[in-house]
Amino acid sequence: MKTNTLPVKSLWLISLTIIPLLSIYGRSLQKLVKDNLDPDQLTLIIALALLLISSKAIYWLIKRHAYQKIWHLAWFLPLFLVVPFFMPIIEERVHFIVFGSFGFLTMLIFSPKIAIGICISASIMDEGLQHYLPDRVGDLFDIAVNIIASLAGAIFAYISWKQQ
């Protein structure tokens, strides 16, 4: 179940670093994005990122010859391609991408129990950090979004990584 490849560990460390950085610099980044992109452009960028992640998931399963596991895309794709667009705030969509990727990578590196603990802890700590930042607000809804996204990514990694 665990993978110890350097690229996976590197991507995991990058995603772990991005989470608090988005909390700390999120408002200035939001301002920069809103000043330079209209909401339609931002939605298109998020849609392309989600499509890329989902395409990578399909490629990954096909490459592993895990054809019988492709049916899991029936819940994974709607969750990551549709649900984020019903979220009222664009920033929550970014949470979904970041935490879903984080959960996926966490499950590839750690045992399931540890991975789930890390996903839940990171979700809570991110909003806890935001609670103490002067221009941010820690939000229970965001904790839920973070947990759902990270656990969905972790579950997908777990299901699709198991031996056939």
Image (cartoon, rainbow, N blue to C red):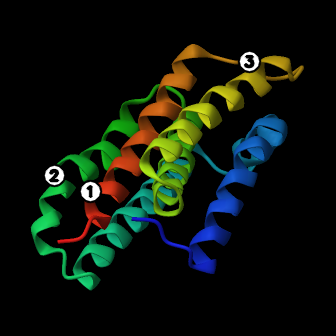
Above or below for 99 versus 139: below
Q: Read off the residue under disc 2.
A: 74
Q: Nearer the viewer, mark 1 or mark 3?
A: 1
Q: Read off the residue under disc 1.
A: 159
Q: Quadrant of the C terminus?
A: bottom left
Tell me the residue at 63%/26% (across/down). Answer: 124
| Kind of residue at disc 3 | Val
| Kind of residue at disc 1 | Ile
Is 11 on the left or on the right of 66, as rendered?
right
Residue 1 in picture, x, y percent from top left: 39, 65
Mark 2 secondary-structure assignment: helix
Residue 45 in picture, x, y percent from top left: 52, 58
Q: Earlier in the sequence, mark 1 or mark 3?
A: 3
Location of residue 161 by image quarter: bottom left
- How far is disc 3 from disc 2 in space, using C-alphas? 34 Å
Q: Read off the residue under disc 3.
A: 137
- How far is disc 1 from disc 3 in space, using C-alphas? 34 Å
Tell me the residue at 20%/46% (across/down). Answer: 75
Q: Nearer the viewer, residue 67 or 49?
A: 67
